[in-house]
């Protein structure tokens, strides 16, 4: 019965896995960046499977809208740190492993130091700036990267930075350059079926275990695409026939001085950002016009007077904007910021232009907190 732990009894019984495979998991260190929709299932299954050390990076707070898919959290956790609450709940699932908490935003200044401590990185983020940053850091440090992404009813999984036949594929072989601002909606704007991140996250966790133990076939140089509506699965080959090395910082100094927000079109805009409270206080001010730049079908509808002019139609309707103060809002704040830049280019400083930071989602979250 030496070294026998009943917790992992089903692993011990597996052919080609057994105690040797379990020891590899217990000796591993895995960093999970993002404790949201994808991160929750990744963290739960890696914790249950016995990964010896798990790092959690996330600076966000839990909100009511998270609970539709982030099943690690509950109502009483709203307003608390995702990383800290995830750690507490994971420790109750498996107190035998070590969990490192990084309650911060990963960036070019801290990424290399954090990632260097781990054997594998799992990207569970939801924005392009983080994805390119994490990829480039993993390339520099030669760390395997398990990638996952979700959108509405479809998800993707791949594994990067594992050398095969003398070649290594990374995220930039798949997407050399970020999309232009506004080209791709995120889940806040386009939505996602709550079950989907659970499925994709479990696939990511599976890839981690396969890499560590050597079982099965890892998705190296392949992109798996899964459609929840019809269960269609496509596995596409990712080639490295183009030289993407000039796109990746070649050393620590170059990496730490790269502005990934700028790279992904997140500009340091001159448009003033308003908190939900400030936004609501300014709605009734004299000579103020409030514009919803979402599409007409999008929910929830605002319960205050506004003009609904979708971003795609804004430039054709500038004659309607007679107020000297313009307040803009959308679902998450991205389109309203873009709309503000369009109006700034047209009117300059002739009009006061500001937008609701975090969009109507942030407004809803504030109302929910006040109700509780």
Image (tube, rainbow, N blue to C red):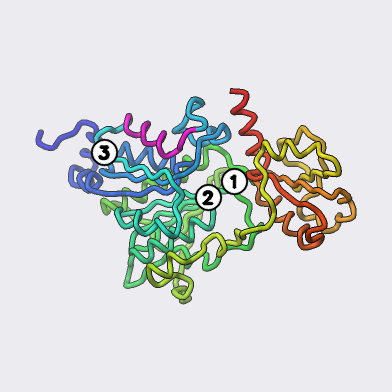
Q: Nearer the viewer, residue 85 or 286?
A: 286
The alpha-carbon separation of the residues under discs 2 and 3 comes to 27 Å
Q: Which residue is mark 2?
A: 126
What crowding class fits label 1: few (fewer than 14 Cα within 10 Å), some (14-19), or many (20 or more)? some
310 is higher (above) or lower (below) than 263: above
Q: Is residue 99 magenta?
A: no
User: Residue at coordinates 90% horizontally, 55% vertically from top-left?
Assistant: 319
Residue 191 appears in which quarter of the rendering? top right
Q: Nearer the viewer, residue 77 or 103?
A: 103
User: Residue at coordinates 81% horizontally, 36% vertically from top-left?
Assistant: 284
Please tell me whether mark 2 sits on a helix, a strand or a loop: loop
Q: Residue 249: image x %, image y %?
A: 43, 70
User: Residue at coordinates 52% horizontally, 58% vertically from top-left?
Assistant: 129
The alpha-carbon separation of the residues under discs 2 and 1 comes to 8 Å
Q: Residue 102: image x %, image y %?
A: 38, 45
Q: Residue 213: image x %, image y %?
A: 26, 51
- Asked if the residues shown at circle 2 and circle 3 are in contact, with their CB atoms under 8 angstroms apart, the answer is no
Give the residue furthest to the top.
372
156 is higher (above) or lower (below) than 168: above
Q: Quadrant of the N terminus?
A: top left
270 is higher (above) or lower (below) than 287: below
Residue 35 appears in which quarter of the rendering? top left
What crowding class fits label 3: few (fewer than 14 Cα within 10 Å), some (14-19), or many (20 or more)? some
Q: Which label belongs to residue 97?
A: 3
Q: Which residues are magenta?
A: 80-92
Q: Which residue is mark 1?
A: 187
- Asked if the residues shown at circle 2 and circle 1 are in contact, with their CB atoms under 8 angstroms apart, the answer is yes
Q: Could you tell which of marks 2 and 1 lies nearer the N-terminus?
A: 2
Name the chief secondary structure element in magenta.
Answer: helix
Residue 313 appears in which quarter of the rendering? bottom right
């Amino acid at each position: 019965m030496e070294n026998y732990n009943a917790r992992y009894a089903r692993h011990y019984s597996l052919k080609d896995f057994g105690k040797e495979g379990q020891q590899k998991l217990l000796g591993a260190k895995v960093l999970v960046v993002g404790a949201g929709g994808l991160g929750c299932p990744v963290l739960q299954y890696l914790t249950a499977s016995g990964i010896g050390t798990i790092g959690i990076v996330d600076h966000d707070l839990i909100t009511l809208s998270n609970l539709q898919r982030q099943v690690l959290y509950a109502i009483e956790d709203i307003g608390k740190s995702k990383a800290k609450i995830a750690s507490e709940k994971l420790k109750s699932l498996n107190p035998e492993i070590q969990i490192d908490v990084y309650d911060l935003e990963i960036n070019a200044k801290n990424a290399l130091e954090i990632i260097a401590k781990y054997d594998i990185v799992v990207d569970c983020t939801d924005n392009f700036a983080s994805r390119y940053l994490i990829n480039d850091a993993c390339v520099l440090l030669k760390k395997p990267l398990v990638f996952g992404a979700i959108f509405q009813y479809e998800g993707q999984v791949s594994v990067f930075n594992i050398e095969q036949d003398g070649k290594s594929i990374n995220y930039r072989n798949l997407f050399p350059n970020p999309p232009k601002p506004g080209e791709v909606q995120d889940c806040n704007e386009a939505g996602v079926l709550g079950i989907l991140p659970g499925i994709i996250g479990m696939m990511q966790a599976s890839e981690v275990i396969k890499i560590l133990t050597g079982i099965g076939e890892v998705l190296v140089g392949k992109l798996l695409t899964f459609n929840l509506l019809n269960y269609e699965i496509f596995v596409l080959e990712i080639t490295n026939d183009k030289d993407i090395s000039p796109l990746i910082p070649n050393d620590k100094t170059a990496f730490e001085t790269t502005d990934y927000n700028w790279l992904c079109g997140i500009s340091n805009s001159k448009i003033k950002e308003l908190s939900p409270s400030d936004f609501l206080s300014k709605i009734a001010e004299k000579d103020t016009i409030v514009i919803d730049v979402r599409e007409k079908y999008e929910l929830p509808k605002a319960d205050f007077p506004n003009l609904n002019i979708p971003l795609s139609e804004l430039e054709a309707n500038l004659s309607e904007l007679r107020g000297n103060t313009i307040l803009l809002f959308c679902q998450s704040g991205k389109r309203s910021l873009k709309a503000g830049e369009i109006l700034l280019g047209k009117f300059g400083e002739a009009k006061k232009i500001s937008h609701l930071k975090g969009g109507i989602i942030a407004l809803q979250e504030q109302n929910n907190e006040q109700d509780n």
